[in-house]
Structure formats: structure tokens, C-alpha cells
Image (cartoon, rainbow, N blue to C red):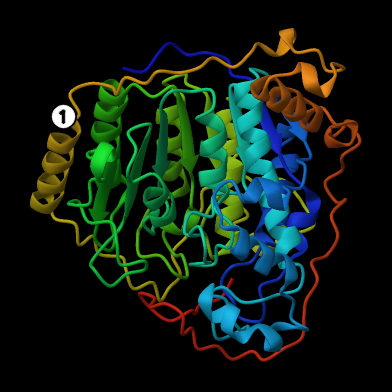
Amino acid sequence: MAGPMTKHRVAYLHDPEVGQYYYGPSHPMKPHRMQLAHQLILGYELQNKMMMYKPHKASDKEMKEFHTEEYIDFLLRITPDNMHEMADRMKQHNVGFVGQYDCPVFDGIFPFCQIFTGGSLDGAHRLIDGSADIAINWSGGLHHAKSDEASGFCYINDIVLAILELLRFYPRVLYVDIDVHHGDGVEEAFVNTDRVMTVSFHKYDGNFFPQTGDVTEIGEGAGRYCSVNVPLNDGIDDNSYEQMFKPVMREILGTYDPKAIVLQCGADSLAGDRLGVFNLSVEAHGKCVSFLKSFNLPMLVLGGGGYVIRNVARCWAHETALLTETDVPNDLPWTEYWHYFAPSYQLHADLRPKDWLYGENLNTKERLDEVRIQTLQNIKKLQGAPSVQMHDLPPISLVDMDSDEDELTDDQRRVRDMERRIEHPNEYFDAEKFQVNDLTTPARLAGNTTHSPASIKRSREWGGSE
């Protein structure tokens, strides 16, 4: 049952540089969407309702908490200039040439990963140290990356790394994924443990990327019944989605008893997405966020997919308003990207293009009932929350930041290092000085505009306009 309404302290992690990276011509993933979303957030003056932080850039050592040393060293070295010399390793790690692979080698690939990963790690630390109840990093949420390879536009799995940090403090973490694609990378990372429950609502037919996420995939070993998959068909609408989401999440929260939530808010589940097949409105997408927020648990909120950037911006600005409990007008505030939102210039607009192919809801009541019943039955088999023996972290107030290295335990040293990183003086944004138009225009790299994605199968061709 959701708790009483509580005013939450919200930390917002953002680095203006993140929107300046470029996957290449005609690639659906456009980091530039972060600039659109961030400027709408500033235009609605939501920065006045949050603690604004510029995250640290994650180190290769931090990334190796999940990813293999060989893979991280490869990402550190690879550039568009030397990729021909590393062809074998590129194939091994599922990256390739722009226009030929879902995960291309582009200029600044490793610094880009450092930024969004640092945001998710710092968000987790804000929850752990108690300075925030909710932490937002819209640049994070790259849920497909595996320990030793890139996948589905994702190179580093910032979600797994953030959850690993949370597990140092919280006995059980709930991961929820509302991207149109199955959160396979996160599920795979924690498939054998009961300390993380992964829940994914996504399109599944055996062919749609990443070809996983059937309702029968429930976890393995100690993690049996801790992987929850809710497979959906094309065209699911607001009412049908809500009728699946709320009963499943209510049962999970009551049975599993998580102590923290990580929510991946992929916006490719919105109607009209270039790679999506659902019919969700911005309002319905946001209801999922509000529902989980109502349980008053520490929550890390991340981005994810989303390939019509004006709609991604609408979605994440709306959800930032919900998380800060701020009513914002439907008329969008003026920003330098005003023209992107024509012709409606509204937050809650009709997202579907005229040639939208997925207007029909192919999720029959009988099929949804079948999936919901099977999912709920699997959850009930948990028979209560797993019991975990935890070693408490030393309270931060008891860690002397100036102590000699030899006098600190490993846990005390980690808490000290975490605090030094979070409290770095360059990380705080002065909301009054941080202007709407202070971001630079994203770089555009020249290159071949053709594409033939070969590394994975997609549900349909990359296409459509922004």
C-alpha cells in the first residue's frame, strides 16, 4: 500500500556536456535530446525545486565493478582514428562502424560513458548518504550493456553499477523498467540473486529486440522468481498499461519489501516513437513514476530509450515536475529549441504521426489477464521478502575525513571517498546563475548517411523524422 503524501527532497544530476556527443548520421540515439529536456526543465523553473548537481565523471576503476577489465580498456583506447587497427576486438565487443552497427565507434565515446555513469553513481550516493529521497539522472538508464560488450546503443550499464552501490547499504533493491525494450542487461546481471528484483514491462514476440523477456523468464538459482517480465503486444494504450502496471507493482512492493527503487523511464514506450510500438501518452508514462513515488522509498530515476527527441523532452520534463510535486502549464515555456515542439507547443500533445502504424491495441483483455495472472502467481511464490544479513556502513558523521589511511577500515575509506567525490565544490549548480541558454550547440560529425544495422535484429528499420 502506498504511504501518505510526503514532500521529497530531490537531487538532479546533469552535465551540460552530455548532449554534445553524436552517435553519427541517421543513428536513432541522439544525446542532443538531453539538452531539449534540460531546457524545458529550466523553462518550467523546476531547478528551484531541486538540488542541482554536476556529477563526477566515472573512472575506469568504477566501471570495472561490473564490466570486464579488457572491455573497459578497449573503450578507453578505441577512437574513429584507430578502429581499423582494432577490428577483431571491435567484433568481440559488439561495436563497429557508424551506419553499420547499433553501437558505433564515435568521437568521445568513453568521456560520454563517464558522464552518464557518474550521474547514476552520484544519484545512488545521494540516496545512501540521506541527502536526497529521490535522485534524477535523465542521461542514465542504458539497460542493454553487458559486462563485456555493448548492446542496443548502450556501452556501459550505469544501472547495474548504481544498483551495486545501493546494495552496499540496502538489503534489497527493486529495479523497474518501462522502456519498450526488455531490460535484459540489468536482468542478466542479477539473475542469480534475490537481493535485486528486476521488473520489465516491454514488447515481446520473440523477434523484437532484444528477443528476450517472456513471462516464463523468472530468474535462476537464488534469484528464482526475482526476475519479473511482463510481455506486451503492439499498440498497448494508457488504460491497458495501467491495468497491468499497478496490480503487478503493488503485489511486488508488498511481497518483496524493497528498501530502494531504481526506475528506468525509457521514453520509447510513448506513442509515435521511431523504434517503439506502444501507444502511451506522456501522462500515462508519468503515472507509473507517480505510483512508485507514492510508496515513499528512496528512488533513483533514470532515462533510457526514446527516439523522437521532442517527445523525450516532454516526457522527462513532465516527470521531473511530478517528482518535485510541481504543477506546470500545458503550454511549453520558451527555450532556444522552441521550434522542435511545433505545431502544438504543448506538453501533452498528440504524439502520433499521420503514418503511425501501431494505432490498434493488439493486447486483448484475455491475453492481458493471462499474463497478469501468471505474473502475480510467480510473485506469490516468493513467500515473503528474502532475508539478508547486512553489515551496516559506518555513519558518515563518524568517519573522520582527515584520518590517516591506515586508521580507516575498508568501509570507512569507501564512505570517505564517496563523500569527497560528492561534495566536490565544482559539482553544485547555482540555480540562479544557471541560464536556460547556456548550453552549446551539439557537434555534428560528417560521414556516410546510409545505414544497415547488422549487429542485431530490430523490430523495424530505423526511420522517421524527429
Q: Nearer the viewer, residue 412 or 346?
A: 412
Q: Which residue does the numbered mark 1 point to in the structure image? A: 380
Percent across and percent down for residue 278 are 35, 59
Residue 401 seen in the current view: yes
Left/right placement of residue 90 relative to residue 48 reads: left
- Badge 1: residue crowd in 10 Å (few <14, some 14–19, many ≥20): some
Q: Is residue 154 above or below residue 454?
A: above
- Outermost top residue: 398
Percent across and percent down for residue 213 are 28, 56
Residue 327 seen in the current view: no
Percent across and percent down for residue 451 are 55, 88
Q: Quadrant of the C terminus?
A: bottom right
Residue at x 54% of width, y 14% of height: 392
Residue at x 76% of width, y 32% of height: 52
Provide the secondary structure element on which disc 1 rests.
helix
Amino acid at pointer 1: Lys
Q: Nearer the viewer, residue 243 or 255?
A: 255
Percent across and percent down for residue 335 are 77, 52
For residue 21, which quarter of the picture? Answer: bottom right
Q: Is residue 50 above or below residue 354?
A: above
Q: Nearer the viewer, residue 79 or 208?
A: 79
Left/right placement of residue 82 relative to residue 365 reads: right
Q: Quadrant of the N terminus?
A: top left
For residue 295, which quarter of the picture? Answer: top left
Q: Nearer the viewer, residue 51 or 184?
A: 184
